[in-house]
Amino acid sequence: MLGFISRPAVKLVERYLPDPYVFVLLLTIIAGAAAIGIERQSPLAVLQYWGDGFWGLLTFSMQMLLVLVTGFMLASSPPVKRLLQSLAGLAKNAGAAIILVTLVSLLASWINWGFGLVVGALFAKELARQIRVDYRLLVASAYSGFVVWHGGLAGSIPLTIATEGHFSVEQIGVIGTSQTIFSFFNLAIVVALFIAVPLINRLMLPSEKESVYIDPALLGDEEQTRARITRPAERLENSMTLALLVGVPGLLYLVNYFIGGGGLNLNVVNFMFLFLAIVLHRTPQSLLNALNEGIKGGAGIVIQFPFYAGIMAIMIQSGLAETMSTALVSIATETSLPFWSFISAGIVNIFVPSGGGQWAVQAPVMLPAAEALGVDIPRVAMAVAWGDAWTNLLQPFWALPVLGIAGLKAKDIMGFCLIQLLFTGIIISIGLTWL
């Protein structure tokens, strides 16, 4: 039904969207040129910002690589394979598969964004093994659920301002999640997206003639055959006892962590995925086989994330991100400030794809504007959060783990995501402005 809209969008993106590596190179040039032309920074100063910031995301890059690898290892373990197969069996046709993968991704992303990225992609692969469905839209549907993450339990901006001692605490105090994540307007947006996003994805389902399918044999699900053990070292590599002696204590640590009140973050998700995979694979050799397969999709993360760190440094250190935010907020009124905060955050997110980093840039602009206009500060903060999440449907940065797991390129899914960008933008804007 939405084919008349999605079809040209898909063709446009397939034709003109370059590889994400080329995309980040273009963004680097644009950010540098804008810092020189708009902020009157010298080329040498911009070069210094870029070089100094280039390695600023090394920790995060490793975390994201581990999200991909540990998630892949967990999903390739026999028990999780059976679980995914059973869940995928609930879908009896292509339309049901699209709706099911979207709902699973939405729920997982609302719980934790790293969890959502991996679970959605892995579930899409399992559905593709069982259902004949357009693989591009299936993976795009899995990624589209990511749009709710910043309005969910792991949203970095609402969690930041709910933390004692945050950088703007003297200005706004500590704002609890009851006013942000669990506020009426935010929950209404989340519920609306849980309804709209699956339906929109379903309506974009191409006809049989236009669909692009994938051979299930290409999805890497072949069973590993156990070689005959002839050396003592091989006994260790295939030892269930060794895996359990390390894996079980790791899981006990997690139990103690959660009992003590610990919450989900990226390190905890990776720790959980890794030690569950160790136990469920049962032998070190089985885990290593999965690792060797899963690491193949991580090349984009390794090469591109340093460039994004450099871009973020240019945007922040030159003042360009602040200038962009100020320009949009300057035309806002008491009613429209949340909307313009949302739009400005969406634009800044294309260059600064980090929720926490983006809030550090935009808070000094948004908070005084909210105070001057008498606008509810939690609403403005959530507007920035939603803007950060929204344009991830356009920015391939966060899609890299999904694409690595699924074995696709950005141009394969971003045409469908572009349609979601339009509809979700309308829904979020209405929720921020009028609810």
Image (spheres, rainbow, N blue to C red):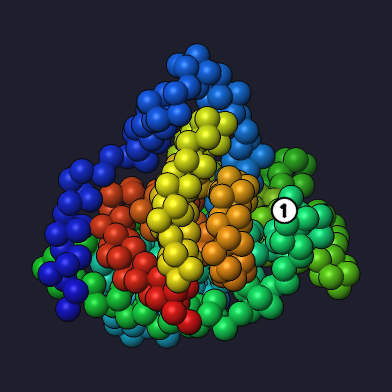
13 sits left or right of 399 in the view: left
Which three-letter amino acid code belongs to the residue tagged 1? Answer: Ser
Residue 386: where, in percent of width, then height?
Answer: 50, 64
The residue shown at (77%, 42%) is 232
- The number of numbered discs placed on residues in the rendered structure image is 1
Tell me what residue is drawn at x 35 percent, y 37 percent.
23
Q: Is residue 74 above or below residue 187?
A: above
320 over 130 or under it: above or below:
above
Q: Is residue 62 above or below residue 185?
A: above
Front residue (pair 48, 126): 48
Say which quarter of the image contains residue 234. top right
Q: Residue furthest top?
A: 44
Q: Nearer the viewer, residue 434 or 331?
A: 331
Residue that extends furthest to the front in the rendered view of this protein:
372
Q: Give me the residue at 84% from left, 65% from top.
A: 257
Residue at x-position 61% and y-position 66%: 377
Q: What is the x, y in percent for residue 69?
A: 58, 50
The answer to whether one can see residue 422 in this image is: yes
Number of residues whose C-alpha sits closer than 10 Å to that of mark 1, classed few (under 14), some (14–19) or many (20 or more): some
Report which residue position mark 1 lands on: 168
Locate the N terminus by quadrant.
bottom left
For the question of whether residue 120 can be seen, the reply is: no
SS assignment at label 1? loop
